[in-house]
């Protein structure tokens, strides 16, 4: 994760205290990680991560060479670049996993950014209004 991305994430991240409260409340974040196993084979892994471990997990995932168990509980795992449809369905039914979450999140973030730009455009005073 580059410094700019990290700074943007830090702006919107809850405080360490809030994350600890979320951990203690039983909150978990379900993720699907696609990567390579120790033998170099494609591997998919569903993992349940404590909110306070999300950023460290994403950083480790980007670097590679880590153990999922250091960050949470493995819910399902297998060989392949994508989980089979029956595994996806099981994760959706058993854990409420949303396979479209990241796409929906980025779309929502883009919508918010576009709304901000519109507000700025129409609320900035024009030079002749000064």
Image: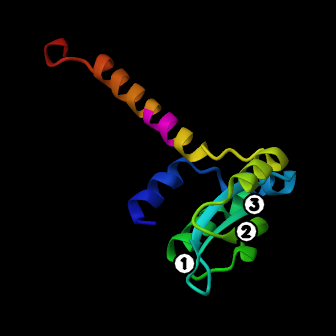
Residue 70, quarter of the rendered image? bottom right
Name which residue lies at 62% across and 86% down. 38
Q: Is label 3 in contact with label 2 (beta carbons under 8 Å)?
A: no
Residue 101 versus residue 115: which sits nearer the camera? Answer: 101
Label whose residue precedes the other's in the sequence (2 or 1): 1
Residue to which mark 1 is pinned: 64
Mark 1, Cα crowd under 10 Å, few <14 / some 14-19 / many 20+, is: few
Is residue 17 among what the camera can see?
A: no
Percent x, y of residue 48: 76, 60
- Classified by dominant secondary structure, the portion drawn in magenta counts as helix
Q: CA distance from mark 1 to mark 3?
A: 19 Å
Residue to which mark 2 is pinned: 77
The answer to whether residue 87 is magenta is no
Helix, strand, or loop for circle 1? Answer: loop
Mark 3, Cα crowd under 10 Å, few <14 / some 14-19 / many 20+, is: many
Left or right of 114? Residue 35 is right
The mark closer to the camera, 3 or 2, is 2
Q: How is the image coloured?
A: rainbow
Residue 50 versus residue 65: which sits nearer the camera? Answer: 65
Percent x, y of residue 58: 58, 65
Percent x, y of residue 22: 78, 51
* 114 shown above or below 58: above
Left or right of 80? Residue 93 is right
Helix, strand, or loop for circle 3? Answer: loop
Q: Residue furthest top?
A: 129
Which residues fall within the magenta stretch?
106-110
Name which residue lies at 80% across and 57% down. 23
Quadrant, the C terminus: top left
Give residue 50's mark: 3
Q: CA distance from mark 3 to mark 2?
A: 18 Å
Residue 41 versus residue 5: which sits nearer the camera? Answer: 41
């Amino acid at each position: 994760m580059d410094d700019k991305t990290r700074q943007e994430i830090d702006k919107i991240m809850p405080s360490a205290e809030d994350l600890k409260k979320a951990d203690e409340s039983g909150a978990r974040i379900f993720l699907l990680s696609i990567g390579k196993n120790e033998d170099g084979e494609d591997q998919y892994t569903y993992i349940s991560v404590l909110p306070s471990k999300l950023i460290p997990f994403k950083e480790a995932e980007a670097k590679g060479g880590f153990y999922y168990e250091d960050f949470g509980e493995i819910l399902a795992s297998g060989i392949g670049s994508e989980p089979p449809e029956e595994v996806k369905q099981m994760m959706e039914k058993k854990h409420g996993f949303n396979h479209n979450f990241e796409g929906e999140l980025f779309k929502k973030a883009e919508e918010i950014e576009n709304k901000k730009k519109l507000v700025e455009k129409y609320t900035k005073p024009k030079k002749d209004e000064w």
